[in-house]
Image (spheres, grey):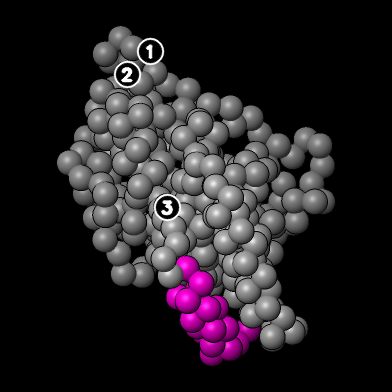
Amino acid sequence: MFTPSDDINRALRTAAHSPTLMLASDFDGCLAPLNKDAMAVTANPTAMNAIIDLAHMPHTFGALVSGRDISKLERLARRTGPQGQNIADDGPDDVRDISGIILAGSHGAEANDGSGVEPNEEQKKLLERMIREAHAVADSAPHSGMFVEEKPLGVGLHGVAMNNDELERQLQQKFADILDSLLDGTTGSYMYGKHILEAQIMKVDKGKWLESARDRYNVDAIVYAGDDTTDENAFRVLHGNDVSIKVGDSHTAAALRVPDTDAIADVYQRLATMRREYLTENGVL
């Protein structure tokens, strides 16, 4: 079991004692270990139970904020099947109830609380073009492991299954060069993540979603954790009694750090315990 530092404990306690609290979490690399098969990951049960617990407390919100499209995010958040087994092989009982959790997919462009955005016709045509170009890049290196993930509002060029870092870099650069021209003068944007170059038809990121969620739910403190470069947008908008936690050892704007998914699960569990104690002491529970 991970033992949080004094700094982490102090930050969690301050956030837990806020009038209104939100725990928002990245999914891949934070709740669930990364896997070359993107549909063979299972969220840490301790972490998911803590988020579910928090989501059902008064004046408290639990959210998953991911680059995955919302349909895949929901399926994977619900699954309890074995780690490393593709979700297609799960049985009917390999699911959990995640009602009450806010899901924000596509970096916040899609959400189950009605806060998502709808593309216009011009953006839909842009998406079709981006998808075609992504497939063309992947097809230029057959059998390399590079693959395309089509999303409702964007497209990802994945290199997680590749074993050639230099070729992965070259293919990503090829796609980036195309996007620089294709997206010029449009609402589109692109960003790099771990083994992915992702293009979107609108400028959205996890930080923008957190800022809107703070206003929408009148949140006094946000606890956010993530492992990827795309999570840096979220870390940069946090302030005051908010808590930012980097999972892993790469450079970050986050104030705090834990080593892995098991450690962040223990942090989430501790936050849920602190929050329950605070609400009980104040007669809310």
Q: Label 3 to label 1, Cα distance in Å?
A: 37 Å
Three-letter code, disc 2: Leu
How many numbered marks does the figure carry? 3
The structure residue drawn at horizontal position 70% and vertical position 37%, both measured from the top left corner, is 95
Q: Label 2 to label 1, Cα distance in Å?
A: 6 Å
* Residue 156 in view here: yes
Q: Dividing the picture into quarters, in which one does residue 213 lie?
A: top left
Assess whether mark 1 and mark 2 are in contact (beta carbons under 8 angstroms).
yes
* Residue 77 screen position, x and y as percent: 61, 42
Please name which of the two marks, 3 or 1, marks the residue nearer to the observer.
Answer: 3
- Position of 216 compared to 13: left or right? right
Q: Label 3 to label 2, Cα distance in Å?
A: 34 Å
Element carrying mark 1: loop
Q: Dividing the picture into quarters, in which one does residue 216 lie?
A: top left
Three-letter code, disc 3: Val
- Position of 129 compared to 15: left or right? right
Residue 108 highlighted magenta (yes or no): no
Q: Which residue is mark 2?
A: 279
The structure residue drawn at horizontal position 69% and vertical position 56%, both measured from the top left corner, is 39
Residue that sits furthest to the bottom in the current view: 166
Three-letter code, disc 1: Leu
Query: Range of the magenta residues?
Result: 163-183
Please give the label number shown on residue 285: 1
Q: Which residue is mark 3?
A: 204
- In the picture, the quarter occupied by the C terminus is top left
* Residue 135 screen position, x and y as percent: 68, 73
* Residue 270 in view here: no
